[in-house]
Image: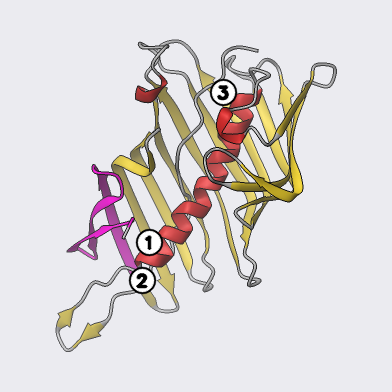
Amino acid sequence: MKKNILKISAFFWVLIIVFPSCESDEVSVNPDNESIQESAMTESAVNDVVGLVNSGTSLKSMSATACGDFVFDQTTNSLTISFPQSGCTGEDGVSRSGVIHAQFTGTWQEVGSTVVVTFDGYKRDGIELSGTLTMSFTATGTLPAFTVTSANMSLSFEDGSTITWTGSTTYTYNGLNTPLDLADDYFEIDGATSGTTKEGKSFAQVATGLQTSTSCKWFVSGNLKITITDGDKTGVYDLTFKEPCGTVDGTYNGIPFTLNLDE
């Protein structure tokens, strides 16, 4: 296998945002920071899985997840990533349990190669991930890229609530001009997903140029536009990420607001 692509530091498909309150003719925008944080951190688990699989293609485990067991079977061209059922905490401070299965077709990081990822009781910080992720390599060379298709994906929480979604997202890898400096490596993320939030609201969102960073669990630039429908009420959140990490400039139906995801 070729050198693995750097672990994706953070990405999310679903944001749970409450609708702003209205009083008379004045609209007050009150984004739900706690829900945004929860959903963003939860969805970073999906990207963590993609990063784990990429790491496994080099037949080495990442230092941040040293408590996991990475086994690549060259006969079946498959990767199994196992964590103790009781859970273990990696150097990144994340607790993982359960098993991730990755079945490869062809040689990963060659155009046309794919890997189908499924889960067997896999949990990240107590949140169980299920469904199917299909990763398809679409470009090599200066800017390697692959597309991740989400099918029947869900996140199950300890209180019995779930988030469900489908969609397709493209990851373009940057930073190869300094191969010995992983700190400047990042993904640029573009794509669209739709599904249902924990509260049963319908959502549709589009990511444009979202940029990850090894030092930020959110994003450092790029845009995420989210349309949330709750009965006959529809709201559009347009979020622009910037540095320092966790800072967002946004609008709700054109009305501006700012928030810090780390507060």
Residue 22, given in percent of the width and then of the height, sits at 24, 83
Q: Report, in whole angstroms, how far the alpha carbon at label 3 lies from the one at label 1.
A: 29 Å
Question: Where does label 2 land, which residue?
Answer: 234
Q: Residue 239 lies in magenta, yes or no?
A: yes
Between the C-alphas of marks 2 and 3, the distance is 36 Å
Pointer 2 with pointer 3, Cβ within 8 A: no
Residue name at image x 72 percent, y 25 percent: 104
Q: Is mark 3 on a helix, strand or loop?
A: strand
- Does residue 237 sit above or below 200 in this rendering? above
The dot on residue 12 is none
Viewed as shown, does residue 164 lie left or right of 188?
right
The location of residue 129, given as percent across then percent down, is: 65, 52
- Which label is found at residue 227? 1
Q: Give coordinates of residue 150: x percent, y percent.
A: 59, 45
Q: Which of marks 3 and 1 is nearer the N terminus?
A: 3
Q: Check disc 3 and report the residue beneath it.
A: 137
Image quarter of residue 114: top right
Give me the residue at 24% from left, 65% from top: 253
Question: Could you tell me which secondary element the residue under label 1 belongs to?
Answer: strand
Q: How would you rate the neighbour count of disc 2 (Cα within 10 Å): few for under 14, some for 14-19, many for 20 or more?
A: some
| Category of crowding for the residue at label 3, using alpha-carbon neighbours closer than 10 angstroms: few (below 14), some (14–19), many (at least 20) | many
Mark 1 crowd level (few <14, some 14–19, many ≥20, 10 Å Cα) = some
Magenta residues, as a range?
Answer: 234-262
Mark 1 and mark 2 residues within 8 Å of each other at the beta carbon: yes
Which residue is nearer to you in this view: 64 or 179?
64
